[in-house]
Image (cartoon, rainbow, N blue to C red):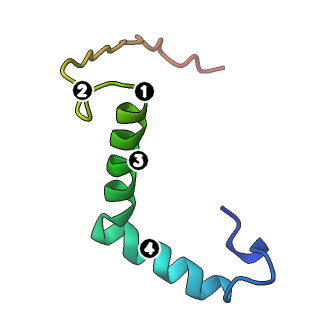
């Protein structure tokens, strides 16, 4: 995010960035995301917590670098 391009009615970018970093450290954004996901799931008639999860991974083999 380009902090210096915030709307004029926001506080100074340093202040906004300071709060953002603090909230990241305190886990505020993670908590907000968790609550919002639960609310969306409930609105869709599903359980607040998923009962099943899939994990998928992909490995990519990289070739050797060619030296010219």
Q: Residue 17 appears at what percent x and percent y?
A: 55, 78
Q: Nearer the viewer, residue 62 or 65?
A: 62
Identify the image quadrant of the N terminus. Answer: bottom right
Q: Is residue 33 above or below residue 28?
A: above
Cβ–Cβ under 8 Å for marks 1 and 2: no
Q: Residue 51 appears at what percent x and percent y?
A: 18, 21
Name the residue: 33% across, 41% down: 38
Mark 1, mark 2: which one is toward the viewer? Answer: 1
Name the residue: 31% across, 57% down: 31
Which badge, 2 or 4, is on the more N-terminal residue?
4
Local SS, label 4: helix
Q: Residues within 10 Å of mark 4 (few under 14, many from 20)?
A: few
Identify the image quadrant of the C terminus. Answer: top right
Mark 4, mark 3: which one is toward the viewer? Answer: 3
Q: On the image, numbered disc 3 is attached to which residue? A: 36
Instruction: Please give left or right for residue 65 compared with residue 52 in the image.
Output: right
Q: On the image, numbered disc 1 is attached to which residue? A: 44
Residue 50, which numbered label? 2
The CA distance from mark 1 to mark 2 is 13 Å
Which badge, 1 or 2, is on the more N-terminal residue?
1
Q: Residue 18 appears at what percent x and percent y?
A: 49, 82
Q: On the image, numbered disc 4 is attached to which residue? A: 21
The CA distance from mark 4 to mark 3 is 20 Å
Q: Residue 35 appears at what percent x and percent y?
A: 34, 50
The CA distance from mark 2 to mark 3 is 14 Å
The CA distance from mark 3 to mark 1 is 12 Å
The CA distance from mark 2 to mark 4 is 29 Å
Q: How many marks?
A: 4
Instruction: Please give left or right for residue 10 compared with residue 39 in the image.
Output: right
Mark 2, mark 4: which one is toward the viewer? Answer: 2
Which badge, 1 or 4, is on the more N-terminal residue?
4
């Amino acid at each position: 995010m380009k902090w210096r391009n915030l709307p004029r009615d926001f506080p100074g970018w340093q202040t906004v960035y300071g709060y953002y970093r603090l909230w990241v450290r305190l886990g505020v954004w993670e908590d907000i995301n968790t609550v919002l996901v639960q609310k969306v799931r409930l609105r869709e008639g599903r359980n607040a917590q998923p009962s099943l999860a899939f994990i998928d991974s992909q490995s990519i083999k990289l070739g050797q670098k060619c030296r010219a």
